[in-house]
Image: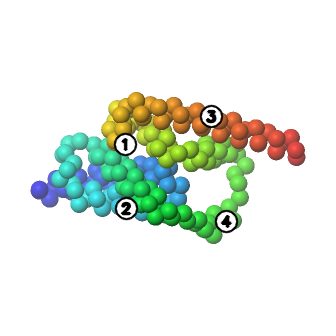
Amino acid sequence: MRTSVMEEKKAAILQEIPRLRRYARALLRDRDAADDLVQDCLERALLRMDNWRTGENPRRWLFTIMHHLFIDQMRKVNRRGEATMLPLDAGEALATPAMQSESVASREIIDALQAISPDRRAALVMVAIEGFSYAEAAMMLGVPAGTLMSRIARGREELRGLLDDQARRRTIRIVEK
């Protein structure tokens, strides 16, 4: 492969890092673990650059690699039965909640998204946040389109329930003060 073509491919892959990090954080709920997943994805992509067709956007290819790595990681954890609690960073432990209503609403949505199952969360993030079509997301996740649509519908329903519950609790707290 010519050096200029490889450099173009590397540059295209590097442009996808912010999206990969966002997807990894949505999947793993932990910044450090997400960064590790992104690094593993990039290593695998760079080693297998010949599998990516020149001229195509690498986004779908990279997200597929990342999702497969995530599934492998989850299977490994399930086999070993590992459950770890990660301590808060010093800055996170001292952080104060935001007072702006948009920040509170955004935090509630993120927390609710993190509370649903990884399969549903992955489907929702792929379609609703990353903007992939149902067909593209189903292909990347390795499931039939009907299964993907079912996961999205159930995930949205679960999110609605969680967000309604959080809104009720917030209203109760305000009334109690």
Which residue lies most toward the left here?
Answer: 2
Q: 151 above or below 76?
A: above
For the residues bearing labels 3 and 4, Cβ distance under 8 angstroms: no
Q: Position of residue 144 (x, y in %)?
A: 36, 34
Residue where numbered disc 2 is placed: 39
- Mark found first going from the N terminus, 4 or 2: 2
Q: Is residue 29 visible?
A: yes
Residue 65 % position (x, y):
32, 51
Taking the image as shown, residue 138 lies to the left or right of residue 155, namely left
Label placed on residue 93 = 4
Hey, what amino acid is under mark 3? Arg
- Name the kind of residue labelled 2 in the image: Gln
Picture residue at 48% right of the left edge, 38% below the top:
124
Which amino acid is tagged 4?
Ala
Asked if the residue under mark 3 is in contact with the one under mark 2, i.e. CB atoms within 8 Å, the reply is no
Per the image, the residue denoted by label 3 is 160
Cα gap from disc 4 to disc 1, whole angstroms: 35 Å
